Each structure stands twice: as structure tokens, then as C-alpha cells.
Image (spheres, rainbow, N blue to C red):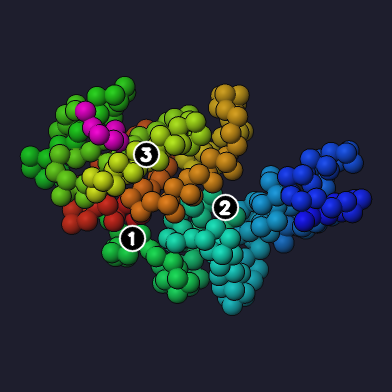
Amino acid sequence: MVNCKVCDKEFKSEKSLHAHIKCHDLRLAEYYQKFHTRRDLFSGDLIKFKSKEYYLSTDFNNRTNLRKWLEGQTDDEKKKYCEKILKARIKKKNLFYAPSQVELRSVMSPPVQYYNRVFGDYNDLCNKLGLKNKFEKLTNKTIKETEPPEDCKIYIDTREQKPFKFDVPFEIKTLKFGDYALSDKKVSGNCYIERKSLNDFIGTMSGGYDRFRREIERAITEDAYLVVLVERCIDEAMNFNKLPYVSSKVRATPEYIFNRVRSLNQDFKNVQFLFAKTKTEAMRLCKKIFFSNHNNPSNSVLKI
């Protein structure tokens, strides 16, 4: 049971309470900001209301304020805060895998690099907290692109309308899933790349979500690894509602889309999301994924 903070009326569900709040001529944001006041730890401003879950779980209005606040803390305080927010996500979301870089970037959390700087090793911290690392075979060495092996070529799916123009051998071929694959599965770690424009990405994570989950499940039966390569930097993807040529066509919010991205990262071991600023960078990443670390490329993706 939940009570209205205005009139003390009792409700069986939060949904009923939220419907009732309108009777007091209050928007949901006004209600929570008045009766559950939360302020940015750095600026002191009221936390912006995007959803109840977001409002009650974040301490900052933007990542800049998070960064500046952390700069003013002692090393011990930095560790304590970073570990606290990671533990909170583990408990609230029942996490199994260590959150990826994209997962951390899409919530109000420091990135993997910051955890590495503060704790020495992000993966060790996650192991300590009981999380399984998808990429436990990774080394700390920087992965460099190598020349493709002889008799090895990139397969491009027949449905790809404007494919990358590779400077290595390629062949147009029908693929079971993904848009790009390598002819030698041992070299690529049986890795497939699903290329997405920003609009395609949003559509897949909204109306096409169930279909894409089935595609991931089919990939599991083939022991295949899927990389979703989005041709847009992650900052713009997380704020697509501010892009006029995108927002007018989309009803879903960035929070809704990236919540689904995080769910897929936790539900499946064989999927990962990467974001590239341009088509040229996306093509370079595609080659790098296929032709880097030939012993186990699917485990190298996170380092790229």
C-alpha cells in the first residue's frame, strides 16, 4: 500500500497513486520533487525528473557534475561512492554479468576507464562483487588490427542495401543473422556484425525488440557472437530525442531504448553493442573485429 503525500489517501498500487496525483493538479515530476526532494550532489539543483526510477536512483543531473564532484573527493571516498552505485545496480537489477562500457555510459555512472584508474582493475572489482565477466580471457594489451589471412574474405548479407566498401576480399552471400561475417569462423570466433543506423537501432530496440531477441537466440544455437554496430556516437544515441530529424519520428525515449540495451547485455552472453561516430569508423571497427586477435576475436570486442 502507498499513501498520497498530499491528502494521505491510501492506494493499492503505485500506478493508482500516479493516476490520483492529477486530482491535485500536480504533474508526476512536481509531486516527487516536492515530497521526495533530491538534489544534485555537485550543483545543488533539483534532480531532473525523467521517471520515478531514474529520479530516486541518481545523484547528478549530468555526467559533468558527476565527474566534477568526484574530483573533489578523496581516493577513499571515490572508491566508496563508485562501489556503492555498482552494488546498488547489482541489487536492483539482479545483475549477473559485469556491466559493459555501454551499460555504464547509459546510466549515471563513471565509465570503465575511471573504475580502472580508481580500483586498478574494473574486472577484479566486479569479480569481488560476484559478477561474471563476459570477457575474462582478455589481456590488458591493446588490440591492433592485422592483415587478413590468405583465402579469407568478408561475407556481406544480400539484404545489405549500402554495404561497406572494403579494401579486402568480400562476397555477397545470404547470412542466417547479422549483416557481415568472415569466411573463416575460426579466425573471427564465429562473430557476426549487425550494422545499424541510428533509426534502425531505435526501431530494433522498440518495435523490433522481440524479433531481435529471437535472432540472438538463433545465434546461440549456432554458437555465434553478435556485435550490434551503430553508426552514431553513443552521446548522440543517448540523446536522440534532441535530434530534430529523429525525434519527430520516434515515440520511444532514450531511457526506454537503452534500458532494453542493458537488458540484452545481461540476458545474453553472445551480444554486445558498439557505437561509431561515422560510417568510416564503423567500417574500420568491422575489419578490426574480424582481423584482430585471431585466437579469440569474440573476446576481443570489448577492448576495441
**Reading the chain from its start, which is encountered first: label 2 or label 1?**
2
Q: In this orientation, does residue 59 appear?
A: yes
Q: Residues within 10 Å of mark 3 (few under 14, many from 20)?
A: few
Q: Amino acid at mark 2?
A: Val
Helix or strand or loop: what does disc 3 sit on? helix
Q: Which residue is mark 1?
A: 135
Whole-angstrom CA distance, mark 3 to mark 2, is: 26 Å
Q: Is residue 279 above or below residue 67?
A: above
Q: Determine if the magenta segment contains residue 198.
A: no
Q: Which residue is mark 2?
A: 107
The residue under the point 33% across, 44% down is: 217
**Reading the chain from its start, which is encountered first: label 3 or label 2?**
2
Residue that sits furthest to the top in the current view: 161
> Dividing the picture into quarters, in which one does residue 163 lie?
top left
Residue 248 in the image, given as x and y percentages of width and height: 60, 24
Q: Which mark is residue 214?
A: 3
Q: Which residues are magenta?
A: 174-179
The residue under the point 50% across, 58% down is: 111
> Dividing the picture into quarters, in which one does residue 128 lie?
bottom left
**Reading the chain from its start, which is encountered first: label 1 or label 3?**
1
Q: Amino acid at mark 1?
A: Phe
Q: Residues within 10 Å of mark 2 (few under 14, many from 20)?
A: many
Whole-angstrom CA distance, mark 1 to mark 3, is: 23 Å
